[in-house]
Amino acid sequence: MGLPIRTYEHFEAGSGRVSYERIASFARATNSDPLAILASVPLRSPELAVRCADNKLMTIAMASLRDLELQLEDELEMLEARTLIGAFDRLVRDLVTHVRSRDVFAETWLQEKAARVDGALIPERLKPGKV
């Protein structure tokens, strides 16, 4: 992170000065999502930072919002709350449906076939309940 050891120890312990630069540096060092780390505070979900570490969901969401702002500029204020709520509700439903109805063929196949091989392990990514 480019910090002196004592400064990092304070940062890790939560007693050091927090800044976006330090959070971004930590995220680069851990290959996580700095915006998910930030969002986890107002959303009261520390788990969000962990859940978004690999897929960078919050960075993607913010980049998409930035793209919307760049395209609409001053017209952004023309979007009504009901339109935004409807759009985000549809997005949430679509993403939940996508994850919950994913093809579980590989998971099922591997569980059935691995049971026939002594000592076979199912990869963590394919265990039931994992996406």
Image (tube, rainbow, N blue to C red):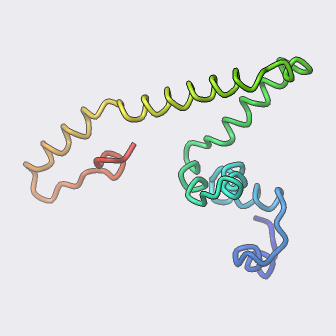
Query: Looking at the image, which is closer to me, 59 or 88?
Result: 88
Quarter occupied by residue 47:
bottom right
* Place of residue 98 in the rendered image (x, y in percent of width and height, measured from the top left): 43, 29
Quadrant for the C terminus, please. top left
Q: Quadrant of residue 92?
A: top right
Left or right placement of residue 104 versus residue 115 in this view: right
Q: Nearer the viewer, residue 45 or 104?
A: 45
Q: Is residue 103 above or below residue 39?
A: above
Q: Is 124 rendered above or below residue 96?
A: below
Comparing 90 with 108, the one in front is 90
Tell whether 127 sits left or right of 90.
left
The answer to which of 47 and 84 lies nearer the viewer is 84
95 vs 44, left or right, is: left
At 68% across and 35% down in the image, what residue appears?
61
Q: Is residue 63 above or below residue 124?
A: above
Check the image and name the residue furthest to the bottom: 6
- Total numbered labels placed on residues in the image: 0
Residue at the (66%, 28%) spot, across then down: 85
Identify the residue shown where x is 25% and y is 40%: 107
Q: Measuring from the top left, give residue 5's x and y in whole percent.
A: 76, 79
Residue reaching furthest left? 116
Look at the image and tell me in which quarter the N terminus lies: bottom right
Q: Which residue is located at x 77 percent, y 22 percent?
A: 80
Could you tell me residue 122's position as x and y percent?
Answer: 25, 51
The furthest residue to the front: 82
Where is residue 63 shown, x and y percent of the image?
74, 33
